[in-house]
Structures are given as structure tokens and as C-alpha cells.
Amino acid sequence: MPNRFLITTIGRVWPKSGPLSTDLGKRVFLGAVVILLVSVPLAVRVVPLGYEEGEPAPRTFRAPRAIQYVDQEATDALRQTAADAVAPVMVFDRQAQAATRSEIVEFFSSVSSSRASYSEDTTGQATFLTDRYRSRTETETIQAVVALSDASVDRVARSVETLVTGLMSTRILEGDLANTRDQLARSAELMALTIPERYAVISVGNAFLQPTLSVDEPATERARQEAIDRVSPVVVVVQEGETIIERGDIVTARTIDLVRRLGGLEQGIGAMSIIAGIAMMALLIVAAGWYLAAYVVPVWLRLRDLLLLSSLLIGMVYATRTMTLLAPEVSPYLMPVPLAAVLATLLVGARSALVLTVLTTVAGLLLGFSGGVQVVATLLSSLTAIVILKGLTQRSHLFYAGGFLMLILAIASFGSSLASGNMLGQSAVAGIYGLAGGLITSILMLGLLPFFEFAFGVTTDITLLELGSPSHPLLRRLMTEAPGTYSHSVMAANLAETAAESIGANPLLARAGAYFHDVGKIRRPAFFVENQAGGENPHDTTSPSLSARIITAHVREGVELANEYRLPPEVVDIVRSHHGTSVVGYFFDKASKKGGPLLEADFRYDGRRPSTREAALVMIADAAEAAVRTLQKPTPPKIEAMIRKIVKTKIDDHQLDETDLTLADIETIVMVYTRMLSSIYHPRVEYPEPEEGKVARADSRREPQRA
């Protein structure tokens, strides 16, 4: 589950006073650090003597010394060819015949068992056998066997065992099964069998017949490895003074690689160009922050999100610079250009991802990694990634999104290359590179997403959806140890989720929070009425003040359990605030009737008032669902009146003061909860007792009953 590891670590060392302790100071400092870190790779330029792949060489270059190196690409190709030439090593499975014979015997033993169990009921026999051998035999085969007499079944069993075991004493490949089955059919034709018996022999025999030869993977791999080891590396020798490239010749990737190996590197480009690039990037970063402050306020207010976006930007800039230095010959279409946009969409939001896309695209231009037409491919792939990933609610859907992203990158790369004036073949290669780049992006997306969730304490919609699985250990405990509370929590989750969708809140957070809001009741489930199942109520023998302390303790204990099971902070906050600081009214009234001095504070929850709309929805859903259960003959007007009373009580008690719910939101919540609870707790129709003499089961007659 998400953790605030990175945020907590930074918070420990951050100044607690002075300009840097203010919200504005923190953001200005973060912006300055980002500009500084991004400027470093923009300022440090290492280019191989001005050579650019595909462009004429500006000067002749000769080897200053003799070198030799292994041409890894040619070597790998030869080794792959040698490995592909090795035929698979086959091995005879001596256990296959005996295993198949046992399976045949077991099958016909099951046939006998079904006959004994279901007597003349052939349908029951067929169903029994189909359930056991559905994956092995076809329904028609089982029906054919069931239709035979006992004597015929015995003949078929002996014939199948004889034919199949005889055939499986030979070497049978997977590809030879068809011919072997034909041979089995011809052999069955020569046996003294009836047509139904012969059909059963062939069908059952085909079902159990299997290859006796299989690929010996370890032996095959050893043979291939031996073939690879016999291939000598392709060694390229460059003599001192040898001409690597003449002036005017077209520079190739191999040329650049040779120049680098020979140490032909020189620093820099024009200083003014570097300064202009840094200034442009700095202005863009400032403009991006300004945009977030004006139009994406929630992200601007969360320093965690700003830190995450900054990390993605810096990571992409340094990854791009590293690629240009270590592998300049690598196609830019192989770079996972949409990765920053993908992660930003999943972790922060689509609008922030758009801002990050602009920054990373411009950074790529300034670093010289992409050209004008390639910028279109970069923007297209990034924007597509943002669209297809927005609102993603299941982690498994990331695989489908990754596949679609691969397709888009392939198309964008092909079109970009074609628009650059390359031939169709070269553009097709660029499309393949784009496909590979999409695969790399998808792999990195799946690998890095959990890391960012943990390091920055981000709770994504995917994480929230996974929390609702009944297999979650804490939910399983709630289900088994406090089943009444679990049922109540599920109902509250349905209410909160539907209301959240209606008012534009996060339905997944509301649902997850409602699932876990009462987990503290696990500690003492019998003290809560929904778990008593009509049994003894321990509060009957407990003082009101003690009962109140027991009841209110479930919030604190729920927070402890939520932290123990590493639930996201947003869900823990809902657990802490689902009762706010409200009064335990039942026990307060009970204590008041006994007389004596009372402190209302002793009967209040010591939690925190809701600060989000999702927490407020869970608070109201929790109270409404529990209260409606107490109504006698509930009707929609009664239910609505009860919900309005609950909402009014919460408002009068100032429990909703810290949320941004509007009057329109509250009205929508009331109507949604009324509609859903009315559909659940509507009056039931009383069915009359059946008259004596009537048939109890309609299926007890062979003919349908008539009115």
C-alpha cells in the first residue's frame, strides 16, 4: 500500500521556521532546484566532432591509433543463426503408456460408478461423467458410452485399453497424432464390434491418446548453447591512420561508434545557444507552475504532487541526456517518450500530465534528441496515453492500455519517419522501433507505478479499487469476526459510492473508505448491535459512560488497524473522521435519565471532523443506513425524513463545517440515499401458506401443471 516514505523523510530535515517554512517558500525553492537540475544536462554537451548520423561529414577522420573490438551485432547474428539451426532434442516418455492406461481404467471405473449411482437415469450418468471429464472428453463421447449396455461397455473398455496402449508403445510426435488416430480408427474397424461400440472405442481412444515423444528442453538448450559457443566473435580491426570517414561522406551509426571508441570527442556548442536554452526551459518551468496555481489548484496546494511532477521531469531529462551520450546511434523512437505523461496521469491527473508533456517535449528538443517532425510523434503518443489512461480503474487494464500505446507509437513513428522524407522501408523500420518503444514504455509503466505509489504516498484509483476486493486480509477479518458490521459496511459503501458519482466526488475513495470505516469493531464485535444476532446485549449490564467509551473506542482502534494493515492515508482519514466529534446520543440520553452530573465531552467521539466530501459521504451513509434499519414499516417518506433529520443533526453539530459540500450537494445526497434505501427496505409482500394436498414441487410431475 502507498507509504509517505519520501515525504516523511523530507519533512524531518526541512526547516521549521524562516522563509522556506512557508508554502510559497517551499514552492519557490522546489522550482529553483528543478531549474538548476534541468540546466546541468542542457549545459554539458558532448558531441562526436560535429558528426550527425545521415548528414555529410564536415571533416575527414583517421584513426589516431590501432584498435580492435568485437562487432557484437554481427556476432549475435551468427550465434542466433547457429542456435536456430539446432533441431529440438526429443525424448521418449516411458511413463506415458502406463499413465494413459491408468486414466482409461479410471474412466471406465467412473462409468461403472455412475451406473451404480444413477441406475437407469442416463441423464444423471452423463452429467456425472461430464463434470469429471469435461476437459478430457467431449459430451457426445460420454453420451455414446452411457447409451451402451454393461456388456458393451466392458468390450469397449478392453478394446480402448488394448488399442491405445499398443499404439503408445511406439514413438508418437505431437504432429503425428492425427495419423495415429487414423490408425486407431482402422484397427477398430477390424474388431468384432457393433457400430455404437466402434464409435465409442474410437472417440474414447482419441480422447486418451497422447504423444510419447516430447522436447527435452534442457538437452535442446544445451545443444543450442554448444552451437553458440562454437561461433567465434566477429572481431573488427582498425589500423592506425586508417580512414574512418572522408569529408562529405554520409555519417553512419557505425562511424559515430568508431569515432567514440577512438576518443574522438570534443566539448561543446556555442555558449549563447546553451544560455538561451537554459533560459527558455526556466521560463517554461515558471509558466508551468503558474498554470498549475491558476487552473489545477488541488495539485498546486499538494506539495507532494509538485515534487512528484518535478521528479518525473528531471528523470526524463537525465534519461534523455544519458541516451544521447551513451548510445547516440539508438533510434529516438525507442525512447519511452510518453512515460512521464503516463505516470503523471495515473498518479496526479490528466491536466498535470499535459503540462509535463509540454516540458518534456521542449527538453527533448533542446537536448537535440528529437527533430521537428519527431516532436509531432512525441506529442501524439503522449496525448494518446493521457486520454486512454484517464479514469483507469483496474490494474489489469494497464496491459490493454500498454498494447494500445504500442500501436499508437508504431503508427506515429512510421508517419514521422515518412514525413521526414525517408523511404518506405526505412519508415517501416522506424515503426518497428516505435512498437519496441511502446513496449519499453509499458514495461516501465508497470514497474515504476508501484514505486512512485510507495515513495510519494500516492493513492491511485487502481489502488482504491483493489482495496474493495473481499480477499483483502482486513476485510476478511471484518467479514468473519464481525459479519453484521461487514454487511453494514457494504451497504454504506454502495450508498457513498453512488452519492459520490452524483456530486462529482471520488466514488472509489468513498467506497473504499466505507468498506473500512468500522474495522475497529473487530476488537469487540459483540458490543455492537448488528453483530448480536438477537442475543444478549452486554450494554444491558454496563454503565452508560463505560458503554460510551467502548463504542467511541472503535474509531481509535479502527485507525490502529488501518495503519497496521497499511491502508492509504486517505482511507485512514475516513476511518478517523466517520463519526467526527459527534455525541453518542443513546448512551448520553440513558445517562441523563439516571441523573447526576454529566460532561457531554465524555460522550463524544475523539476523532476528527470530516475534511473531504468523501469522508462526509461516509459519515452520512453510516448514520443513515443504521437509522433506517430501526424504522417500523419503512416507506420512502419516512426514510427521507430520517435522512434529513440525520443531516440536520450533523450540520447543527458543526460536523460538516470543514468539508466543501454545497446545499445542492447535500440535497443530492439526501435524494440518492432515500432512493437507494427505499429500494432496499421497502415493505415485503406476505405470501399465503400453501393449501394441503397441493403439489409441493412442480418438477415432481412429468407433465407441467395446469391452472
Image (cartoon, helix red, strand yellow):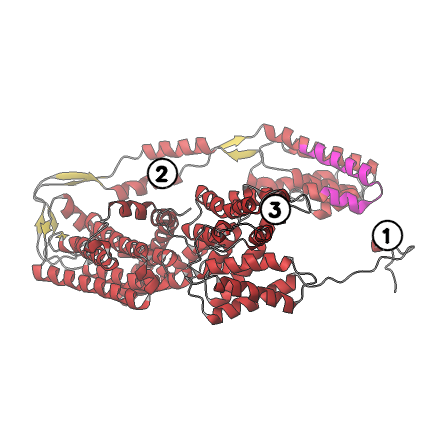
Pair 2/1: label in front: 1
Residue lying at the far front of the rendered structure? 596
Q: Is residue 183 visible?
A: no
Disc 3 marks which residue?
A: 483
Are there few (<14), some (14-19), or many (20+) residues within 10 Å of tag 2?
A: some
Identify residue type, mark 3: Pro
Q: Position of residue 407 (x, y in %)?
A: 40, 59
Disc 1 marks which residue?
A: 700
How far apart marks 2 and 1 lie (CA) works out to 72 Å
Pair 3/1: label in front: 3
Does label 2 or label 3 sit earlier along the sequence?
2
Q: Position of residue 187 (x, y in %)?
A: 71, 38
Disc 2 marks which residue?
A: 82
Q: Quadrant of the image for the C terminus?
A: bottom right
Is 634 in the magenta?
Answer: no
Residue at disc 3, secondary structure: helix
Pair 2/3: label in front: 3
How far apart marks 3 and 1 lie (CA) works out to 38 Å
Q: Label for residue 684?
A: none
Are there few (<14), some (14-19), or many (20+) residues within 10 Å of tag 1?
A: few
